Image: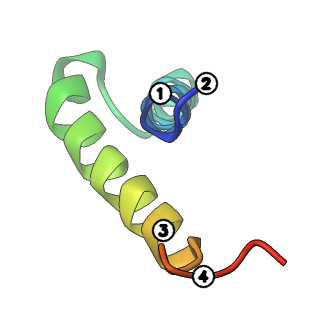
Amino acid sequence: MAIEEKILNVSKEIVVKFIEVGRVSPASFPETFKDVYRAVKEAVEEGAPPEDADDD
């Protein structure tokens, strides 16, 4: 599974959980999803090793 797919899945699961516990309404899913997706993607990119790093 590509990293992009994983980011999408994690973001979706987070927003769905927020809806289940009442923190977010289903009507605000699109806007909330964009915010969560952006946050997850930034977190993944911050934790990723530099592209030119050796795999030693």
The nearer-to-camera label among 1 and 3 is 1
Q: Are marks 4 and 2 in contact (CB under 8 Å)?
A: no
Give the residue at mark 3: 43
Q: Earlier in the sequence, mark 4 or mark 1?
A: 1
Which of 8 and 28 lies nearest the eye of the viewer? Answer: 8
Local packing at callout 4 (Cα closer than 10 Å; few below 14, some 14-19, many 20+) is few
Q: Are marks 1 and 3 in contact (CB under 8 Å)?
A: no
SS for callout 4: loop
Q: Label 4 is placed on what type of residue?
A: Ala
Say how the picture is coloured: rainbow
Where does residue 21 sit, x and y in percent of width and height? 57, 31
Q: Give how far apart the Cα atoms at labels 2 and 1 are.
A: 6 Å
Q: Position of residue 49 (x, y in %)?
A: 59, 77
N-terminal of the pair, mark 4 or mark 2, is 2
Tell me which corner region of the image, top left, top right, bottom left or bottom right, holds residue 42: bottom left
* Marker disc for residue 53: 4
Foreground: 24 or 16? Answer: 16
Rounded to the nearest angstrom, the CA distance separating label 4 from label 1 is 23 Å
Amino acid beneath label 1: Glu
Mark 3 or mark 2: whose residue is earlier in sequence: 2
Labels 4 and 1 touching (C-beta < 8 A): no
Number of numbered discs present? 4
**Which residue shows up at 28% across the image and 35% down it?**
33
**Between marks 4 and 3 in the image, the one whose residue lies nearer the viewer:** 4
Q: CA distance from mark 1 to mark 3?
A: 15 Å
> How many angstroms separate mark 3 from mark 2 (CA)?
18 Å
Which element is circle 3 on? helix
**Category of crowding for the residue at label 2, using alpha-carbon neighbours closer than 10 angstroms: few (below 14), some (14–19), many (at least 20):** few
Residue that extends furthest to the top in the rendered view of this protein:
26
Image side of residue 12 versus residue 28, left or right: right
Disc 3 residue type (three-letter) = Ala
Q: Which residue is mark 1?
A: 5
